[in-house]
Image (cartoon, rainbow, N blue to C red):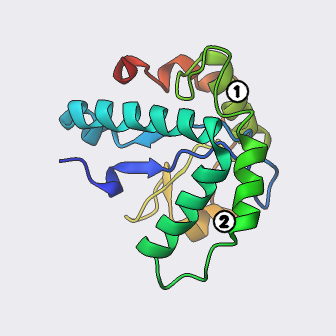
Amino acid sequence: MLKSTDVLARPDSLTRATRFARSPGYPLVFFKSRSRKENEEAVARFLQQLQKAYEWAVSDPAAAASNMAARVSELFPELAAVDADQLKQSVQSASGTLLDKDGNALTMTDTRWSGFLNWLFDVGLMTTKMQSRGPASATKTTLDGLRGSDAGSPLPRDAVRPSDLFTNAFLN
């Protein structure tokens, strides 16, 4: 069974500011490799439904924002109320960028991933060390280590090929 913890990053077509720079904001969805392999049908259904949600959001941004605000309040009552007007403006602003020229939100391409990778490299997030909850080593560090000076050395840009990072196999 696919769990919410199997999805490593929420799809987000809105450009998000970070302390480094602005990410390209493409709708990208990350799954744990093992979860994806063990739950192929669930992943495919999830992505197909997500595509439909993007199409609906583009066709009626006001309704999409209203629905999202209501669901956030329902699912996370401990959070402050979502500013429905601000959310509506965000969805309307983003609706022109949610779908590609063929009407697809989730079709991945080398170009899309190159943009994302370029941003990661430009802001210094692609290094020889990765975050781990285990002990630090030559290739692992803690989150505090990454925030500090134990992030390792920058990787060369050609160390990661965009085509190795995505699949469109689950979209059919």
141 vs 164: above or below: below
Q: CA distance from mark 2 to mark 1?
A: 21 Å
The secondary structure type at the circle numbered 1 is helix
User: Type of residue at label 1?
Assistant: Arg
Give the image quarter of residue 115: top right
**Which residue is identified by label 2?**
147
> What secondary structure is found at the residue carrying circle 2?
helix
Amino acid type of the residue tagged 2 in the rendering: Arg
Q: Is residue 124 visible?
A: no
* Quadrant position of residue 58: top right
Q: Residues within 10 Å of mark 1 (few under 14, many from 20)?
A: few
Q: Identify the residue at image location x=43%, y=19%.
A: 168
Q: Residues within 10 Å of mark 2 (few under 14, many from 20)?
A: few
| In the image, farthest residue toward the top | 102
147 up-or-down from 120: above or below: below
| Residue in the foreground of this view, choosing between 114 and 122 | 114
**Which residue was labeled with disc 1?**
157
Q: Position of residue 142 (x, y in %)?
A: 51, 65
The residue shown at (69%, 29%) is 156
Judge whether residue 118 can be spotted in this image.
Answer: yes
Q: Position of residue 92 (x, y in %)?
A: 74, 46
The percent coordinates of residue 103 (x first, y second) are: 60, 20
Location of residue 164 in the rendering, given as x and y in whole percent from the top left corner:
48, 21
> How many numbered marks does the figure carry?
2
